[in-house]
Amino acid sequence: MKYLVMVQGSQADYEAMGGKASPQSPAWSERELQDMFAFMNKLNDDLAESGELVDGQGLTEPAQTRLVGVDDNGRPVITDGPYGETKEVLAGYWVLDCESLERVTEIAQRINECPAPAGAPTPPVVIRPIQGAGGDGEPGC
């Protein structure tokens, strides 16, 4: 079965990783960033070696995003981020092919062990099965 495993963050989290503290997160040192990247690289290597990694990417900060919608008259409305009304956004993801929900939950628990400065937020890891990707008879998109 394939699963989308997601980590969330905020603009303040990205700024903290860039050295700018906020009430939500302390500033990260260069060493703390290196430790986080080393942890993620090791995790990705382990998942690739086990054959469970399909894809995984970190995403740029919310300030670099763009929202495309439509107004009440059906005309396009394009807004550059970050968005004040959105506290957390998708910060990174993995597409994993795991034999069970229990296995992907073990991986999510490992993700939560990622090193971070004391006082930094630890948002939950979100697991969503990918519809139609595991031979469950449901159509995929």
Image (cartoon, grey):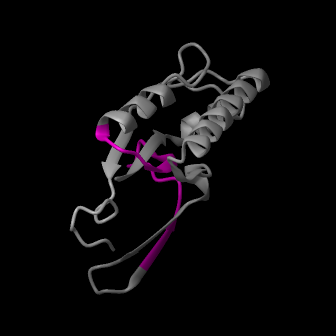
Q: Is residue 40 magenta?
A: no
Where residue 17 appears, x then y in whole percent?
66, 32
Q: Is residue 78 magenta?
A: yes
Where residue 141 appears, x then y in whole percent?
33, 74
Q: State the residue at coordinates (65%, 29%).
A: 39
Q: Nearer the viewer, residue 75 or 67?
A: 67
Is 104 drawn above or below residue 115 in the view shown? below
Q: Is residue 50 left or right of residue 130?
A: right
Q: State the residue at coordinates (62%, 52%).
A: 60
Quarter of the image holding residue 47?
A: top right
Q: Which residues are magenta?
A: 77-101
The residue lying furthest to the top in this view is: 118
The residue lying furthest to the left in this view is: 137
Q: Is residue 1 left or right of residue 53?
A: left
The residue lying furthest to the right in this view is: 30
Where residue 13 appears, x then y in whole percent?
56, 34
Q: How many marks?
A: 0
Is 33 drawn above or below residue 129 in the view shown? above
Is 79 drawn above or below residue 57 in the view shown? below
Q: Nearer the viewer, residue 46 or 115?
A: 46
Q: Nearer the viewer, residue 57 or 68?
A: 57
Q: State the residue at coordinates (46%, 40%).
A: 7
Quarter of the image holding residue 70?
A: bottom left
Q: Is residue 31 left or right of residue 75?
A: right
Q: Is residue 49 left or right of residue 8?
A: right
Where residue 112 appears, x then y in whole percent?
47, 26
Q: State the residue at coordinates (33%, 58%).
A: 130
